Image: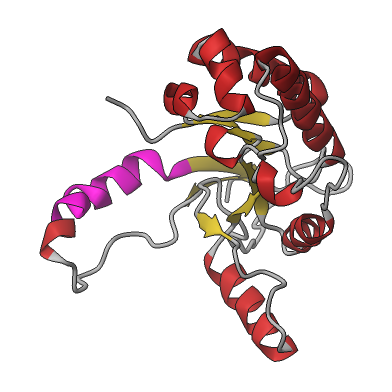
Amino acid sequence: MRPLLLLALCLVACRPAFAAVDVNPGDAALLVGANARIEKLRKADAVVMVVDKKGKPVQNASIHVEQVRHSFFFGCAALSLLKHTDPAREAEYEKRFADLFNFATVLTYWQDLDPAPDRENLDGLTGQVRRLNAMGIRVKGHPLLLAGACPPWVPTDPDAACVLCRKRIEALASHFRGEIDLWDVVGDATTAAGAQNGLGAWARQAGPAPLTAQALGWARAANPAATLLYNDYKLD
């Protein structure tokens, strides 16, 4: 036997193919060609060389390969994490979440974390993030800036609001560096100018693209290793 073993490893697919299951008629079109796409996009070949301590090929080696994680992120918002009063229910929630998902979104809405000036409360968020990290689940923070979540205490002077937005982005992105390395930095900039608050005032002055560019730059400086995203619902 040659020491080079060619293995077809399914990198990210949870199943090798879609079996015959009950599907809503409206969703059936989504599965057309799914098996072919799995073969093309979610599988790859890998070459494994088995060697001894001196780096020499081992003849007739027997190996066992087991997929332990996926490159494809699949998850949802961890809204209920650490919020169950019954420890048994919390344990069950965490088990079921981890059994199904490898990715989770935590909510970082400004008005919720900073209900008043100098009253930042990160305790609940920090607990969720650290628990998810311990569970081996990739975490995304959502969002750093969203006009609809701007606290009413942020001044409506656009320059003053811009300063506070920068302070918030830099503080959160740096504070959670290494724990949250995936961020929705700006949400819904296309409609932000319509918000009657400080962030809306800055959006009207700057415009959606310059506002987004500045925010992304601040986040990049605060966490150079992070993956930074723009999030929007209005694509027309």
* Residue 118 quadrant: top right
Q: Position of residue 73 (x, y in %)?
A: 53, 49
The magenta segment: 28-44
Residue at (70, 15) in percent of width and height? 217
Identify the residue at the far left of this view. Answer: 25
Q: Position of residue 133 (x, y in %)?
A: 76, 56
Q: Position of residue 186 (x, y in %)?
A: 57, 29
**Total label count?**
0
User: 68 or 56: nearer the eye?
Assistant: 68
Residue at (55, 62) in percent of width and height? 101
User: 16 or 142: nearer the eye?
Assistant: 142
Placement of the C terminus among the 4 image quadrants: top left
Q: Which is the main secondary structure of the residues drawn in magenta? A: helix
Height in image: 122 above or below 209? below
Q: Position of residue 52 (x, y in %)?
A: 82, 49
Residue 131 in view (yes/no): yes
Does 103 appear in magenta?
no
Does 36 appear in magenta?
yes
* Residue 57 quadrant: top right
Residue 108 in view (yes/no): no
Display colour scheme: secondary structure
Please state if 167 lies on the left or on the right of 151 as rendered: right
Residue at (27, 62) in percent of width and height? 18
Residue at (74, 48) in percent of width and height? 115
User: 195 or 216: nearer the eye?
Assistant: 195
Height in image: 17 above or below 161? below
